[in-house]
Every structure is written in structure tokens, then in C-alpha cells.
Amino acid sequence: MSKRLRKPIKKEKDFSDKIIKILSQSANKAFNYKQIGAKLELDDTQSRNQIIKDLKILAASKKIIESEPGKYLVKAESKEYYEGKIDMTGRKTAYFICPEFEEDVFIPTNNLNHALDKDTVKVYVYNRRSGRRAEGEVIEVVERYKTDFVGVIDIQKNFSFVSTANPKMYTDIFIPKDKIGEAEQGDVVLVHIEDWPSRADSPFGKVVKVLGKPGEHDTEIHAILAEYGLPAEFPIEVETFAQKIDTSIEASEIAKRRDMRDTLTFTIDPKDAKDFDDALSFKPLENGNYEIGIHIADVSHYLEEGTILDDEAYQRATSVYLVDRVVPMLPEVLSNFACSLRPQEEKYTFSAIFEISEKCEVVNQWFGRTVIFSDQRFAYEEAQYIIETKDNTIPTEISITGSSYVVSDEIVAATLKMDELAKIFRRNRMNEGAISFDKVEVKFNLDPEGEPEGVYFKIAKDANHLIEEFMLLANRKVAEFIGKQKKTFIYRIHDEPNEDKLFAMQSVIAKFGYKIDFKQGSISQALNKLMEDVNGKKEQNLIDTLAIRSMSKAKYSTDNIGHYGLAFDYYSHFTSPIRRYPDVMVHRLLQFYLDGGKSVDEETYETKCLHSSTMEGLATNAERDSIKYMQVKYMQNHQDQEFLGVISGVTEWGIYVEIIENKCEGMVRTRDIKEDYYTFDEKQYALVGANSDRLLQLGDEIYVKVKNADLVKKQLDFNFIKRNE
């Protein structure tokens, strides 16, 4: 008779980590050794004895508590588990970000336990052994970062799944048959996650809104907005409220304001701008100085606190500038009409007025509510023409009106003098340590249907800098005026650069023959020197991007730490209340303090600052996605064309290539490079040919063709054609 084969005993030298994890999952419940053994699926005598032993050791070391004989609890103050954020990778794994760890904790796929990207979670962190990275397991999802997702629906007989294009969303969303709504097969939909049962592979959701068919222009633009939770239109009740606002200019209101209607005033904005929220006035003074006014739309006059219109503006916090449209913070009746400083119209404004000497010394300043009359509207191109030629005849080809016209000698003189002063202000800022980032902006020429006909680059010139310097002056002086009174205010702050990122950037730019000289002067001076060196070079866009990423992000706060990038001790946002809610709050606080009000509650305004910074970040992401979408759409129409590009990134799975003539970026997969078998060399940050030892590295120029242009994923894939040799 054959002997029965015995089931092998599961052996484990030490169950301590697993015991603490089990106790941490139910922090208020006590367990005995049998219950722990059952959870570990261990029922042999040897393992049970080891569990008993480990429990006694853990209790003796005070890592757990024996709450009653034979029953154990995890210590309330135990630091075996931590709270922080999940950062998903594109490979269904994640990192746990927590201030208590210098390095991020790796979370394998099977330890995610339903956590999604950016969720706030409680994580059990395994004891770190020498030479090994820390790993963890999600014990609890404390708070979902988001529950609404955009994706394409696949409808089956009794249920549906929605798959997203987001590489960090590692699961489909299950939609029961009765929660499909009006969606049809293949529609792009917005879905809301309602539940995620513990044993389910996918979360359960319902269709909230049908956005349209994949690839259609409006569908993809609305999908971008929906992905970031940004509204595409105003609620009807908000529009109705806005329409009923009295926008007339009244003599009784003018009497309360400083009347600036007789002072020469004009606006300079982009050619296609519809809202003009800032104007400049200019008046020579008898003492040889100049009175220059920065006049900002008085949005707070119309936007009363506590109304549904104000609530909507606060929730939006910012206008969103997509590639083909603007999603405004305020309804059109205000943003494009009542508050817009349109030419030949009287407008209510909030102003910062300065007496400035020839040397750009601010001799006197005044802040308050005004009424102005704009004499002229300029596009940047028209103002630039005046600066370059000192001519008062605007030619047809750059005219905003489409025909030649003559500008008054008075306005020409004002423009030239203000340009002269702006250049001094800018030079002074640079000498104080400000950093100059004139990053090239990609713009598209669109036909009436929103199809891209061409790409062009927006480059800041003297006219842009003229406006920039006087807006900076107003923002700085308003912040300084309140800051020195030690009253609660909303500042625009910017911390020092991240040194680790700067050193990482150093190794990349060295491949192009550049360096950041930390020994000579300040970091800001070194970065400015780098910006000068790369100006106009093919690698400028790449290095500008790397430099910006090394910087801290500017944000809103009541805690003033100054603005590193601008080299200002005090800085705020005062000049764009039509499109930024923090500017509206600044106007309200400034007037409140001018009227003698006491300092407001700091905590209340810090919460508002945090919300404004968050919404600004979402809007920025949406704007980038819309540009990427339009680049993919543009390249769809150029699939047979060879393009010269520069390698802008190298990874183990391929190289990123930025096309020089249009800045569109895509990937060449390593497997698609046929000239050799390439592998990734992390030290050289390059792909190395196995047979030839030739490198493909940052800055190399290669020719590519479009392999695939995916509008839904906003992703470009290129085929490698040849090197540029």
C-alpha cells in the first residue's frame, strides 16, 4: 500500500511583518494566534508555534499590545503604516509618496488593493532590509482623488465596460446594464465610480454624460475638460443671473471714483483677444517725471460676494485657454462686454497709479477705484511696429482692423517712452536675480471648423515685455503695500529651485555642450546665462522645458515667502480679475484695507488659495492636453512626409523625438529601429547598438515619419528613417 503524500508544510522563519500588517488592517480589533494563522492560511503546528513566538516577541518589543490574555492589538502610535498619496506608473505599479520617507515606497500591482492614482491611502510599509528598496501594501483608501473618468464604452448584452486612455488608470470600469443611460457602442462617455466591491476586479460605475464619438473634434475637446472636472458651459441659472446685472455707467458711481477719462489710455493685447482686463495710461508731468496708470477691470464691482455668480466663479477659479477656445471664468456678458476695457468706452477700473522718474524710480503711488476711457486698442504686433519703426502709420499686414490707419503722435510718444522705461525695469529685475524664461509657445492656424492648417511659434518681443513690466510693477507694489501692514493677503509665491533636479538637468545639458556654473554668482544668474546660450538653437525648447521643470511651482498663499523667479520680496496677482479669481479676492481685500478694515481670517483665505492653485493646475493640464491633441491632429494630415527631429528623451522602450519645424513630439519604439538591435544604457542615457556600438542620445538629429497618430490617446508614434549625418 502506497504511502499517502503529505502536504508540504509552509515554513517561515519570521511572521512579524505579516502579523503587524494583519493587525494594522483592523487596528481596533484584537486577534489570537489561531485567527492570525487562519488569515495567513497556515494551520500546521510548526507555523502556529512560530506565530505564537513572534507575537510574544512583538509584544515584548512593544510593537503590539496584548490587550487580554492571548489577544493582540497593533499599537495606536505604531508607525508600521503611514498615510500619503499614490503615484501610479504606466505599468500597473505605483509609488507611495509620504513626507516621512526620503524615498518613495514601491507598491506592486497585487498590493494596490483598489487604490488609484493620486488617492490618499493608508499603507503598510515592510521592514526595509539593507540594500533593498522599501515596499508597501495599501491597507485602506482614505480618500479618492477623483471618481469621474472619461473613456470609451464597450456595450455587451448584459453589461458594459468603459476603458480610459489614461495610462495611469490600470482598470476598466464596469457599468451595469441599467446604468448605461443613452450611451451607444463606442461612445466617449463620462462615468462616475459608485462602488468597488472587495472581490471585484473592476470598480462599478454609471454613465453620467455622453460626450460623442471618438476622434470628433468637439468630443475630444469636451473629453479633455471632463477628464479634469472642468465645466464646458455655465448653468442656465448663472447665465440668467449675469444677464440681469446692471452694467450701465452711472454718474453717481463715477462720483465715488478718481476720474481718469481725460488721461491718454490704451490697451495692448493679443490680436485675437476678446476680453481686455488691463489698460495703461500715460501723462508727462511738469517736474520731468511721468504718471503711469495700470488700470484693471473692476470685476468686483459686478461680482458680489455670496451670489450664485460669485460661487460659480470661485469654483472655476480661472479661465481655461484651450487650443481652439476659451472656457471663461465669467459669463460673456461680463468677460467680453461689461468688464472688458474696450476702445472708445467708459469703464469702471481698479487702478495702481505711479509717478515714475526717468531712472524708473517710483516716486509716488496711489491705489483705488477709477473710471477710464480707452482711446485705442492695439495688438502686440501693432505696438511692436511702433517700437521698431517709431512710425505712426500701422500698415495693413499687421493691422488688427485689416486696413492701414494712423496713430496719434501722442500715443506713439507714450508707447516709446513706456517701452524705454520697461526696458530699465526689466534690466533692474535681471540684475536683482530674476530668471528670464521666454519659452517658445506653439500656436495653430485653425480653419473655421477648427482644423489645424499650420503651426507657428509665439515669441515674446518688446511690446510683450512692455505690458509685462508694468503689470509686474502693479502686482509687486500692491503686495508690498499690504504686506508691510502685516495684514492677511493673497500672495503669488515661488520657492527656490530643487537642487536635485538642477543637478540632474546638468548631466542632460552637458550632452549639448552646456553647463550651469554654480560657482559663478547665483543660481538665477547661471540659469539666465544658460537661457542666453541656447536662445535660437534647435535644442532650446528641450532645455527651456528641463529648466522650467527644475523650478518649484508658483502658487497662491497667505504665507509670503517671496517670488524667487521674479526676485521680488512681495508679489501678488492684481491684474487679471476677468480670468483669475485670486485677482478678484486681491481687489476686494485691497479696497477693504483702504477703507480701514482690520486683518481678515488667515485660515479662511489660505483655503481659498489652495483651491485656486489646484484649479490652476487642472486648467494648465487641460491646456497642454489640447495642444497635444491638436499636434496629433495636425500630424495626421502629414503621414507621408519626412520630418527632421531632435531626440528629446530616451527610455528603455524607445526615444522621444521633437520635430524641429513644428515642435510636435512623438515616440520611436526601440523595436521599430531596424538599423541595429538597440538596448538602453542608463548611465549614458542613450540607446546603444549591439553590433555597431553607435548611440542614439539626447540632441541627436534623426529623420522620422508618422507611424500612428492616435487622437483619443493624444499620442504620436514615429518610424525611424535615418540619422541626419
Image: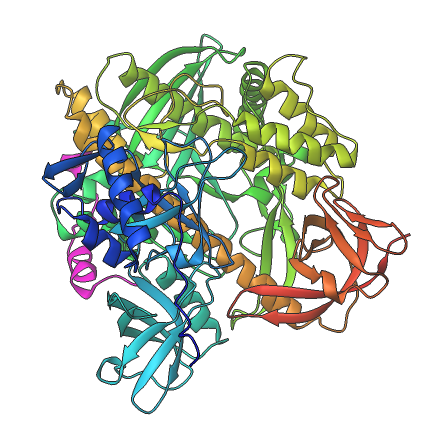
Left or right: residue 162 compared with residue 696: left
Reply above or below: 193 against 284. Answer: below
Is 590 one of the magenta-colored residues?
Answer: no
User: Looking at this view, is 636 or 379 the one in front?
Assistant: 636
The image shows residue 222 at horizontal and vertical percentages of 39, 67
Picture quarter with the N terminus: bottom left
Left or right: residue 538 compared with residue 543: right
The image shows residue 52 at horizontal and vertical percentages of 24, 44
**Residue 371 appearing in the image:** yes
Q: Quadrant of residue 668?
A: bottom right
Q: Residue furthest bottom?
A: 157
Q: How many marks?
A: 0
Q: Which residues are magenta?
A: 233-254
The image shows residue 566 at horizontal and vertical percentages of 49, 24
Q: Residue at x 65, y 36 (%)?
A: 391
User: Looking at this view, is 399 or 685 the one in front?
Assistant: 685
Q: Residue at x 65, y 54 (%)?
A: 456
Q: Quadrant of residue 644?
A: bottom right
